[in-house]
Each structure stands twice: as C-alpha cells, then as structure tokens.
Image (tube, rainbow, N blue to C red):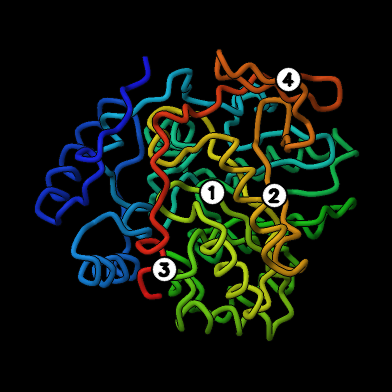
Amino acid sequence: MAAPALSPASVAPTLPAEQALLDARFADLARAERLLPLKVTAFYQAKIDEEVAALGHTEGPLHRTAHPTRERFAVHAGHEVADWVDDRSNMRVTGSDAIIHKYPDRVLFMPTSLCAGHCQYCFRQDVLTEQHEAGRTRVAEELGRLVAYLGTVPEVREVILSGGDPLTLPLRDLKLILETLRALPRRPAIRIHTRALAFAPRTFADPAKLDLLAAADVRLVFHFVHPYEICDAVRGVLRELRRRDVRLYNHFPLLRGVNDHAAVIARLVEDLDDARVRTLSVYVPEPIRYSAPYRMPLDRVFAIQDALTTGWPGWANAIRFTLDSPVGKVRREHIVARDRAAGTVTFRREGQSIVYPDFPAMLDVAGDPATMLWRG
C-alpha cells in the first residue's frame, strides 16, 4: 500500500545529527531486506561533507546519492518489485549468474559484483546482493563460460561489461577479459559501464589500465548523475583517456532530489561535453523496492524532457529518455495506453507489451533547484 502524501514537515531538511541515525537504521534495513549496505569512498564523502557544510543539512544532491533519506523508510509507491527488468530470466547459461542475454545482438557480462561505492538508487540491488552473499569472484571460470556461450550465438556483436563495476577488478583480471574477447574469431565490440570515476578517480591511476582500455578499443560509459561529480580530479582522468583516444560516453538516471530539473541536467550535459564526453541517454528510475525517494511521475519526466528540448541547443537536448523493462528499453513514443485511475501506463515494443506502474503524483516532492545547484 502506498504511503500517504508527504507533509511539509516530513520533507523538512534533515540535520547531520539525524542523518547519523538514518544511516544506522538503514544498516538494519539493508540486512533485513537484502539491500546493498552503505559504501562511500573517502573521495566522494569529502564532496558530501563540503555540500553539507554549505547547505547546513543533508538533503543535497550528492548526499542523496549515497545516504538514505527519511523517505527511504516511509514512502512506498505500490507495485514495487525486487527485479523489474527480470534479469534472472535472461541468465541463459547453466550455472552462471554473470551472463545476461536479453537483446539478440549483445550480451551483458558481470565479472564482479563489487562497486567502488554503493548508490542508494541502484536498480540491480537484488541481484548484486545475492552475488555478494555467494561471494562470487570466479572471473576466469565465468569468462570461460562466456566464451563458450558466444560461440553458440553468432548474432551477438557486442559484449557489455557491467556488474558491479568492472573497473574495480584487478588489472590482471581486466586484462584477461579484454584480451580474451579481442582474440575471439568473431571479435565483438566491447562496452564498459562504470561509476568508478565518480567515486574514486584513483581507480584510473595506473597508466597500464588506461593503455589497456585503449588497446581493447572499448566504449567507456560513465554514470555521472550530477555536475558536481565533474571535478578537477575527474577532468584529469578524462584528459588522459582522451589522449589515448578512448571513446567516452555518459548514461544516467533521472533522480528526484538529485537532478530532476532541466537546468541540472543541462549543466551536467554541458560540463561533460566540455570534457568531450557524449551523453547517450537519461533513464527513468525503475519501480523496484525502496526506490520511491528517487522516482517521479512520467508526466513530470516528459515535462523535463520538453524543457530541455525547447530551452537548450540541439547538441544538448538530443538525448534519449528511456525506461528499461522486461521487454527492453521503451520510450515515450512506445506508449499505447494510459489508465490514470489505476495509475498505469502501457508500453508496446516489437509486439510485446508491458504495463508500468506510474509513480503517484501525490507522493512527488520535486527537488529544489536552489538546493540541487547550491553552488549557483
């Protein structure tokens, strides 16, 4: 059952003293509900501390990415599930939970369940928590299964490394994966998704790792969610990657209280463009358990999309807004029906339909642009 609408008092800024209690309470919730525990790098926490000092409370955008809010415990939209995209049904290799084949021409490979830090809004918490509990670290074994499987699916043209964060792997493991894939008779394109640069630029400190990424001709897709994540340390790594001619992209979620305003998204896209990083898409948060603090109604998602389209130049607004689903990524143009009384939206893609439970407008407390862009 959905929680009642938030009152102004319930969204009053949280003070640091209360946040410590929320963090402790979340540790208990994570254990009980099999959520990812708090994990924040010293690098990222320093940015959060600067934000808290400037705002005087813990409702800033970077803080919300890494620490729980009151909403985390009190607000539920209904119809939330553990695995909205149904990853497990696409794990087609017997004995492996590291290979997901959902789209005919590409395979997702998760060589690790570990990340540099944990995002509160993570949409793969269920699968990653399960893998953490299993303690999976069998990179060579899983890679062998992947190579064998690729030999049976000639239509696959791309392997996407995700997880967990592949760039947290030891260099020897990352080298084994990339060089093995590059040596295949039908050499697939390689894409790597990572948030490590936002959490810990030192992950890229070894020039041998950067050289390896360049030699494997990877497409490197970051997950920056806010312009304040693009600092001098991050720009320095991006310069080194560009110097090696690595192709750089960004792909990120639209998150309530973090970036849910066209001005915040435009600032992020512009800062990345200045660093020669191309923004691919913005994705709508999925209706998974405990995701309500970050979700918003589709009507507001589309309003933000329209504001970008009309208010910024084409290079900044030509970004896809997508929702991942069990039938694949769907967009605004895939909507075929809406039932506002029931709060559902039906998408149809390639002959398959999915009914999406929209986020209730009564629970939607939009982020404050002055807080999300507190530096001005």
Neighbours of disc 1 within 10 Å: few (<14), some (14-19), many (20+): many
Asked which secondary structure carries label 2, the reply is: strand
- Which amino acid, by three-letter code, is at mark 2? Ile
Q: Of callouts 2 and 1, which one flags the residue occurring earlier in the amino acid sequence?
A: 2
Q: CA distance from mark 1 to mark 4?
A: 23 Å
- The residue sitting at 72% across, 36% down in the picture is 329
201 in relation to 124, above or below? below
**Mark 2 or mark 1: which is in front?**
1
- The residue sitting at 17% across, 50% down in the picture is 19
Q: Of callouts 3 and 1, which one flags the residue occurring earlier in the amino acid sequence?
A: 3
The answer to the question of whether label 1 and label 4 lie on touching residues, with beta carbons closer than 8 A, is no
Q: Of callouts 4 and 3, which one flags the residue occurring earlier in the amino acid sequence?
A: 3
User: Which of these two is toward me, 280 or 162?
Assistant: 280
Neighbours of disc 4 within 10 Å: few (<14), some (14-19), many (20+): few
- The residue beneath circle 2 is 160
Q: Of callouts 3 and 2, which one flags the residue occurring earlier in the amino acid sequence?
A: 2
- The residue sitting at 71% across, 74% down in the picture is 246
Instruction: Classify the position of the N terminus by image quarter.
Output: top left
Tag of residue 254 = 1
The answer to the question of whether label 2 and label 4 lie on touching residues, with beta carbons closer than 8 A, is no
Tag of residue 337 = 4
- The residue beneath circle 3 is 200
Measured from the top left, where is residue 346 in percent x and y?
70, 21
